[in-house]
Image: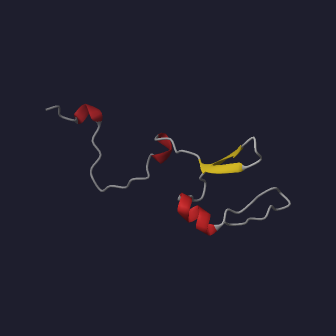
Amino acid sequence: MAEAAITSKGQITIPAEIRKKMNLGPQDKVIFTLLPNGTTVMRAKNRSVTSLAGTIVTNKKKVAIKDMKMN
């Protein structure tokens, strides 16, 4: 179990052990769900494919689709 405090601005810092286990980093989003029994569940928001654009670096030459050969 981990604990976090709420600042005067309503912000919390997710403890490092939780961030590591959830693979969370800067600019990642989380979703809070309040269950009927009063329990709150926090989960990482799924990233869209378009948000991952540019995250894979390669040294291969870029080729336009029109220049690709079809086999």
Quadrant assignment, res 36: top right
Q: Is residue 69 above or below residue 52?
A: above
Q: Position of residue 68 (x, y in %)?
A: 22, 35
Locate residue 45 relative to residue 5 in the image: left or right.
left
- The C terminus lies in quadrant: top left
Q: Position of residue 54 (x, y in %)?
A: 43, 49
Q: Position of residue 43 (x, y in %)?
A: 61, 50
In the image, farthest residue toward the left: 71
All told, the count of numbered labels is: 0
Locate residue 16 relative to residue 58 in the image: left or right.
right
In the image, farthest residue toward the front: 37
In the image, farthest residue toward the right: 8
Out of 15 and 50, give the one closest to the viewer.
15
Out of 36 and 33, give the one closest to the viewer.
36
Out of 22 and 56, give the one closest to the viewer.
22
- The N terminus lies in quadrant: bottom right
| Model colouring | secondary structure
Q: Name which residue lies at 55% across and 64% down.
A: 20
Q: Name which residue lies at 23% across and 35% down.
A: 67
Quadrant assignment, res 35: top right
Q: Position of residue 55 (x, y in %)?
A: 44, 52
Out of 23 and 33, give the one closest to the viewer.
33
Q: Name which residue lies at 60% across and 63% down.
A: 18
